[in-house]
Image (cartoon, rainbow, N blue to C red):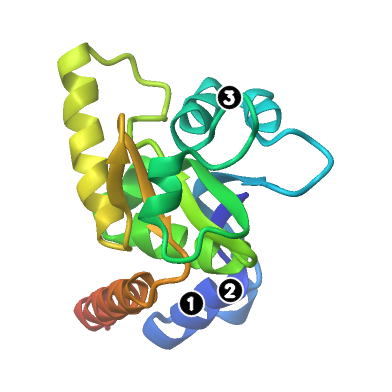
Amino acid sequence: MSARIEADVLAEDLAAYSDMDQESLDTVEDVTVGGMSFVPIRMFGPDHPFEAMDSYTGDVSRIGEVVLDVADGRWEPAFEAALAHPVGDLLVMDRVILEPPWRGLGLGPVLAGAAIRRLSQDCVAVACEPGSADGRELTEEQHREAAAKLSRVWERIGFEPFQDGVHILDCHLQRPQDLLAERQDEFNALCRAWREHHRP
């Protein structure tokens, strides 16, 4: 899915904070700020859960090897023990990539958290493996630094380290909901400050 600012929202802000005429406002288009990829894994569907994960990217397959008993398709015991109520499906956060101008503003956790809230119904957890996913060539040291930095970013919406580089967010806990609300409040405050700074 793509993450974008819709044209009507942009036009509304431009009308309020600039002297653009209506003809110019009518030409405003959506602005894409990034893209996200989530993979729902049905634990009680027609397909074997690990085979379903293995059919996606290598990253999704690696997460499957950590959270599932690959042979029988049930939860790996340590993963099951880490969850409050381990009955339901799994959502994998495969990629969250922001366009360069939109990085460093706190937007990633807000967008990812909103997507998780929408997509995680009937899921026990969301799993991810933090790392750079924007196609840049990185050294091993740079990859470790990127993974550590992204781990801290995702912890801000409730992900916690589990095993072998995989992080999990327990969907049955209140804490992720509270953290997402905090991130949204921070982002809204940033937007208000930007508007005040750019007010004519």
- The residue labelled by disc 1 is 20
Residue at 64%, 65% in the rendered image: 122
Residue at 26%, 42% in the rendered image: 150
- Within 10 Å of the Cα at label 1, are there few (<14), some (14-19), or many (20+) other Cα atoms? few
Count the numbered circles shown: 3
- The residue labelled by disc 3 is 57
Percent across and percent down for residue 37 are 57, 43
Q: Amino acid at mark 3?
A: Thr
Percent across and percent down for residue 135 are 42, 22
Q: Are marks 2 and 1 in contact (CB under 8 Å)?
A: yes
- The residue labelled by disc 2 is 25
Residue at 15%, 17% in the rendered image: 141
Residue at 63%, 24% in the rendered image: 54
Percent across and percent down for residue 95 are 48, 39
Outermost right residue: 46
Residue 8 against residue 146 in the figure, above or below: below
Q: Are marks 3 and 2 in contact (CB under 8 Å)?
A: no
Residue 120 against residue 93 in the figure, above or below: below
